[in-house]
Image: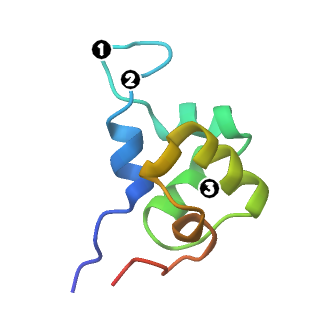
Amino acid sequence: MSKAPHPLREWRKSQPSPTNPAKSMSQAELGELVGVGSAQISLIESWDRGCSYQVAKKITDLAGDAVSLETLITKEASAA
């Protein structure tokens, strides 16, 4: 059974790239904005790992209501 898409991925793909607005934001660009590497963003988006409260807060400050703290901090909060 496949997991539902992570809300962070859906939000990120809906955002324009800071360097090329014709494309969507990359994992590397989001990582740079919140102070982590693209690998950490990939792990979060694939439901393999949550992140620290500090990183989750930075992400929710950017994404607003599109991504909840719970889905970022716990890896399987909404994966079912």
Task: Classify residue 74 by image quadrant.
Answer: bottom right
The three-letter amino acid code for the residue at tag 1 is: Ala
Q: Is residue 37 visible?
A: no
Q: Residues within 10 Å of mark 1 (few under 14, many from 20)?
A: few
Instruction: Identify which residue is drawn at 43% across, 30% down.
Output: 25
What residue sits right under mark 1 in the picture? 22
Which is nearer the N-term, disc 1 or disc 2? Answer: 2
For marks 3 and 1, give the CA distance: 25 Å
Colouring convention used in this rendered image of the protein: rainbow
Identify the residue shown where x is 38% and y is 62%: 6
The kind of residue on which mark 2 rests is: Pro
In the picture, which quadrant includes the N terminus? Answer: bottom left
Q: In the displayed orientation, state which residue is furthest to the left.
A: 1
Task: Identify which residue, 72 or 24, lies in the foreground.
Answer: 72
Disc 3 crowd, CA 10 A, few/some/many (<14, 14-19, 20+)? some
Looking at the image, do the residues carrying marks 2 and 3 touch, with CB atoms under 8 Å apart? no
Q: Earlier in the sequence, mark 3 or mark 1?
A: 1
